[in-house]
Image (cartoon, grey):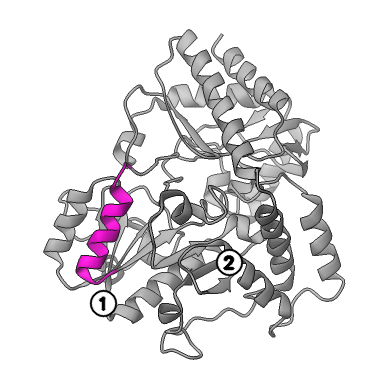
Amino acid sequence: MLYQRSSQLFAEAEKVIPGGVNSPVRAFKSVGGTPIFVNEAKGAYLYDVDGNRLIDYINSWGPMLLGHAYPPVVEAVIEKAKKGTSFGMPTAIETEIAALAVSMVPNVDKIRFVNSGTEACMSAIRLARGYTDREKIIKFKGCYHGHSDSFLIQAGSGAVTFGSPNSPGVTQGTAKDTLLATYNDLANVAAILEANKGEVAAIIIEPVAGNMGCVPPKEGFLEGLRQLCDAHGMLLIFDEVMTGFRLAKGGAQELFGVKADLVTFGKVIGGGLPVGAFAGSAKIMDYLAPIGPVYQAGTLAGNPLAMAAGLAMLRAISEDETLFKRLEEKTAYLEQGIRKVLEAKQINYTINRVGSMISVFFDEREVVDFETAGYGNNDTFKTFFHGLLKEGVYIAPSSYETWFITDALTYEDLDFTIQAVETVFS
C-alpha cells in the first residue's frame, strides 16, 4: 500500500501542530514510520487519504462499538445540529441520557457529564478528596486516567515511596499525594495503606487495564480492593472510560460483580463524540456544586450533539440482548485464529482478552501488570504492526494499547485478519 498523501499531510501538520498530532498516541513513535491520515470510515473499515481500505481494530480507541458512522448515531447528531450546536443551558436530552445510563449501570444514582475521560477522572478524584476530607490517592502503574497532573506520576523503587513527576510541568507538591501501586498485587496496596494510614481518599483503577495492553484483573483482586477500601474508609473508583458499556451493559461492575463508589465514563457513552461522565450514589454525588461544597463545572458539558450521539448509542446497546454475546464470540474467534497461526510459526506470544478487548504480546510469559507487559519483543511487534498495515489491517501503533473489536466486523473480516497474521510471519 502507498501512503504518499499521508506523508505529505504529516509534513504539513508538523509545521503547525506539535509533533504533527493532537494526541501523542497517534504518532508512530514506537513503531516508526508516518501516521496514517483518515479520510472517512464506515462500519469496520477506515478509508485513508491515499485510497486504502483498512480493517480497523482501534475503533477510535473504543467508542465505535457498533461500527463507524452508525446510522442511528449519525442521524441523531444531524437532527440535533439543525436546532443548534451549543447553548450553555440545560436541555431535556441531558436528563434523558442520564436516566438511561443510571438504569444500565449498577450501584449509581446520579451522573454528571463532562467533556472528556480526563476531565471525568480528574473530577472524580476531586470529589473523592472532598467527600473523605483526605488528600492522597492510589493509582496503579500502567493504568492511564488521562493527563491531569495527579495521574502523570511515576513510582520510586520502594512499594511505599511517594511518586515523582513523570512529565515536566507536574509539581512535586502534586506528585507527593499520588501513591503508585502494582496492578494485580493486593499485598503491595496493603503495604502502601499501612504506610499512609488515614490519609488516602481513594483508589482509582482501570478494572480491566487497556493502556498497558489488555490486562485483566486476577481472580479476587478487585474484590480485595473493595475490602481494603471499606476497611480504610476510602472510595473505590472504577475508571470505565474504556470498559463502560463495552464489556457489558453495566460495564465492569456488572461483569465482575464488584461495587465501585464512583465510576468514570467516556468513549462509548458519547457515541464517538468528545464526552465523559462520572457517576455514583446520591450520597456522594450530592457533594458536587451547586448543592454541595465540591466545585466542578464545564461550559460545554452536556453538549447537545454529544448527548444525542450518546443517547442513540446507549439505546442501541440497551435494546440489543445479544450484542455482548456476539462481541464475545467474534473476539474469541479472532483470538483462536491468531493463536493457531503464532503456534504454527513458533512465535513466542501471550494473548490477553476480556470480552471485546484483546492484546497480543510477543513473549510467552503471563502478562499481569506493567512490568510484565514490557517483556514483549518490540522488534517483533514493529514487524507485526507494519506487516498487518501492508495487508490492510490497522491495529494500535503501540504494544501498550489494547485492540477494540466492533460488532460491524464480519467473520470474513476476521478470517482476512488471521490470514494477514500468517502472511506477516511467512
Of residues 216 and 157, which is closer to you in this image?
Answer: 216
Question: Does label 1 or label 2 sit earlier along the sequence?
Answer: 2
Looking at the rendering, which quadrant does residue 102 occupy? bottom right
The amino acid beneath tag 1 is: Arg
Identity of the residue drawn at 56% across and 19% down: 337
Element carrying mark 2:
helix
Residue furthest left as drawn: 195
The amino acid beneath tag 2 is: Ser
Q: Is residue 203 left or right of residue 108?
A: left
Q: Is residue 260 left or right of residue 27?
A: left
Element carrying mark 1:
loop
Position in image of residue 60 (x %, y %): 63, 47
Identity of the residue drawn at 52% across and 52% down: 242
**Residue corresponding to mark 2:** 103
Q: How many neighbours does mark 1 have within 10 angstroms: few (below 14), some (14-19), or many (20 or more)? A: some
Position in image of residue 324 (x %, y %): 60, 43
Looking at the rendering, which quadrant does residue 152 occupy? bottom left
Task: Note whether residue 117 is visible.
Answer: yes
Q: Main secondary structure of the magenta part?
A: helix
**Residue corresponding to mark 1:** 134
Position in image of residue 420 (x %, y %): 63, 18
Position in image of residue 407 (x %, y %): 68, 40
Report the number of numbered marks.
Answer: 2
Of residues 302 and 374, which is closer to you in this image?
Answer: 302
Identity of the residue drawn at 74% across and 36% down: 45
Looking at the picture, does residue 351 appear above or below residue 255?
above
Q: Which residues are magenta?
A: 218-234
As for residue 96 lying within the magenta part, the answer is no
